[in-house]
Amino acid sequence: MAALDPVLNDIDRDLDNALERLFAFLRIPSISTDPAYAPHCREAAAWLAGTLTALGFETSVEETSLHPVVLAHAPKPGAPHVLFYGHYDVQPVDPLDLWETSPFEPRLAAGPDGAQRIVARGASDDKGQVMTFVEACRAWKAMTGELPCGVTILIEGAEENGSQGLPEWVAANRERLGADIVLVCDTSMWDGTTPAITTSLRGLAYFEVKVTCADRDLHSGFFGGAAANPIHVLSRLIADLHDAEGRVALPGFYEGVRETPPAILDQWRGLGFTAEKFLGPIGLKEPVGERGRMLIEMIQSRPACDVNGIIGGYTGEGTKTVIASQASAKVSFRLVDDQDPEVLARTFEAFVRERIPADCSVEVICYKGSRAIALPFDMPELATASAALQDEWGGAPVTIGAGGSIPIVGDFKRLLDRNTLLIGFGLDDDRIHSPNEKYDLRSFHKGTRSWARILAALRREGQG
Amino acid sequence: MAALDPVLNDIDRDLDNALERLFAFLRIPSISTDPAYAPHCREAAAWLAGTLTALGFETSVEETSLHPVVLAHAPKPGAPHVLFYGHYDVQPVDPLDLWETSPFEPRLAAGPDGAQRIVARGASDDKGQVMTFVEACRAWKAMTGELPCGVTILIEGAEENGSQGLPEWVAANRERLGADIVLVCDTSMWDGTTPAITTSLRGLAYFEVKVTCADRDLHSGFFGGAAANPIHVLSRLIADLHDAEGRVALPGFYEGVRETPPAILDQWRGLGFTAEKFLGPIGLKEPVGERGRMLIEMIQSRPACDVNGIIGGYTGEGTKTVIASQASAKVSFRLVDDQDPEVLARTFEAFVRERIPADCSVEVICYKGSRAIALPFDMPELATASAALQDEWGGAPVTIGAGGSIPIVGDFKRLLDRNTLLIGFGLDDDRIHSPNEKYDLRSFHKGTRSWARILAALRREGQG
């Protein structure tokens, strides 16, 4: 691969310009879960389309039932073909007052270790990661006039909203998405120096529960002690979600959950994954969750339930003696193995309704769910990419399970019959979904170099 | 009382102008619990001072540690002297989207029964009620050139914020508050045609609990199942506040609570106070609270605990897979008999701290508390006012306990050694502290006439 060195050198040389391009992308507040930001999602799609067209891709912005997708083609007859998937949408930014600087004014800042970080909403999830692949393509084009493989790029705008509309769009556009393998850059490294290829993902089922008692807010002086309080009803319901052993208390919840094989547990034991290491950096010491299980099991191979938000009554400064009419909570479940989000939706709704006093009412909103995903350890592309990553980072990458969910990966298998390589350069302290999200400059730079190497390696593989 | 009839006629004739004056007062958004509205509290005080000066009162606006009080004197040597107390501050207006019209743009609107209502924040609590007394004074001055009794008016601006700063101000200004009796217009009628004199008030202890787990918001995909969730911790704590019998589960909570005497219980049984009558209008059927007690006990003579607000995590539209760093709740207790808010503060904080995992932290903010108050049934002014109310309304007023708390009444007893007559014209459906607060035009009109009569009756009593 005589061509690879100039490409890597060009990536090094052009890093400042690459950062400027990423910053322009990060300035677009493309929050997909809040309808008020829909025009900005469209703006992010247009920006990407412009960028990919300039790189020689045949590009289109296509409608879905929510935000548009960007589709870009650079065919290469005879060479292997990859489908790269990412998302241009980002999480909401609240609580805004905890951001040190405005979430959509990206900046470089030194971290505690002195390393430079790109700080902005979406820096890591997923705009920075998407741009590692785009910049790798740019360098190949600049240095050789072409890409090593055929490349299709599909960037969606609703990943943070359960990829609403995407499976339908993929199903309707199968023939335009032909590829040998799917590449996704939306996961993390094992640590700052060890790359990782993710081979399993937890599923997700997300609900909102709205409890209504009286038909108006009440004065607690008059009605306190006599009128039902929806915050009490909701709190009891949330308290009931887990038993004293830390297990999720929904009937039948653990059906379809398999025990992790002893060999894998042994391998995990060897990783030195301690509570101190995992929870220490976020200010915690004690893992919660099922008693008697390893921490790494809890986040990789066991299901979980978390209340992601709650609101009711007076939440301003000072006091107000009110009994709210309504209180609501957002409740999500991480799923593994064969847990079925549709079965869970029925179980959860029944669990909730049993706990609502006859007098009160409840609405259970069921957002899109996804099953867990496990990818084969024996894909040939896994070994190829693994070697390319080792060339860049110096150490062998580890294959891991990830706690998060990327539902579309299951759809690619189901609809396109293609496996996915999940390779990302995020770090556990990237604060994705949190204030002051960041992406290490090193992740961005070496991530771009990694993709340049992986594309070269996949071509060799295709020729071998 | 030959003078009384022209005074009552003047009140009838001038009603439209009186409404215009009240509307001007209601347009001032004098929310005392939110520091952003402090200038408007000052504006409300200035408006009142202007109004009372124009009526011939010697008026001053005086500083306290929070919002200023308005003090107005109209001495009358040889006549009985009354101290009228009210408040110009109002509750916050959220949730704003449930208001049919802007809370500070007062209007008249017909209720379901066709009767005219004054709709605005503060219409009933307490600006409308304060103006019944001010308008009664205005009519007396207009028709006779003087007031029947000596009158001191004290209007504070922090009642909805626990009367912060007022007891200290009263203690420092004892000699300026000399009076035979205190009059307060901040309570309700028994029903739309039966006036009430309130002779007992529940106390209040109000807390805020802030639970912090991780030092930042977390992605529930990575950390779900392993990291402590403050919404879970807070929900379990709230679920623990009551036992299965509906009793408050804090250790020692019922110490100092006396059983209501059987004779009073018998009297209450005769009132026909049913769940259908009390809870039906707010869309509820089943009373909550201690099993086996009458509903009227629950709101008049038993203590209670309500969570008045809760917030944590993502509360916007759609979904966000976050584990919050912090969640907080506002928790208040209604106190009776000898329950001591300071003892309760210690018990509550210990109860909370016991339930916080070692890893997490909690802040318990203790807002001002007040003990319950019981006024003597044998005050001579009670019989006098009772007769005056009967003249106006046609039926005998009932003496009742009230669920709400007006802490300063206890301070008047303690600091000025004066009893208080609590007479108000609010109705249970006034939606005070709620969206679309209203005050019946009839309450305003006949309330003003009632005070004109009571002032006349107190003078006769003084001369008798």
Image (cartoon, coloured by chain):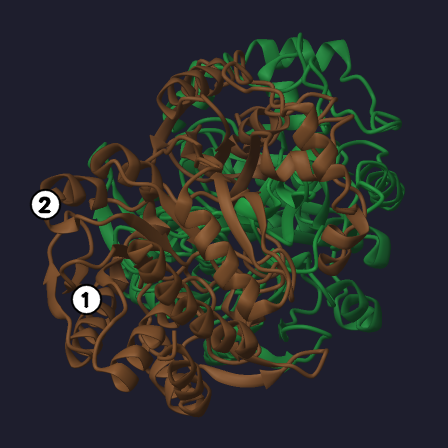
Chain colours: A brown, B green
Residue at 15% across / 71% down in the picture? A57
Name the residue type under label 1. Answer: Arg
> What chain does badge 1 belong to?
A
> Mark 2 packing: few (<14 Cα in 10 Å), some, or many (20+)?
few
Residue nearest the observer in this picture, A60 or B27: A60
Residue at label 2? A175
> Mark 1 packing: few (<14 Cα in 10 Å), some, or many (20+)?
many
The vertical placement of A432 against B315, above or below, is below
The answer, for residue B351, to whether it is visible in the render is yes
> Circle 2 sits in a helix, a strand or a loop, which is it?
helix
Q: Which mark is residue A42?
A: 1
On the image, which quarter does residue A385 sit in? bottom left
Residue at 36% across / 33% down in the picture? A369
Q: Is residue B358 left or right of residue A122?
A: right
Q: Position of residue B221 (x, y in %)?
A: 53, 45
Residue nearest the observer in this picture, A374 or A213: A374
The vertical placement of A136 against B344, above or below, is below
The answer, for residue B383, to whether it is visible in the render is no
Marks 2/1 in contact by CB < 8 Å: the verdict is no
Q: Position of residue A196 (x, y in %)?
A: 56, 54
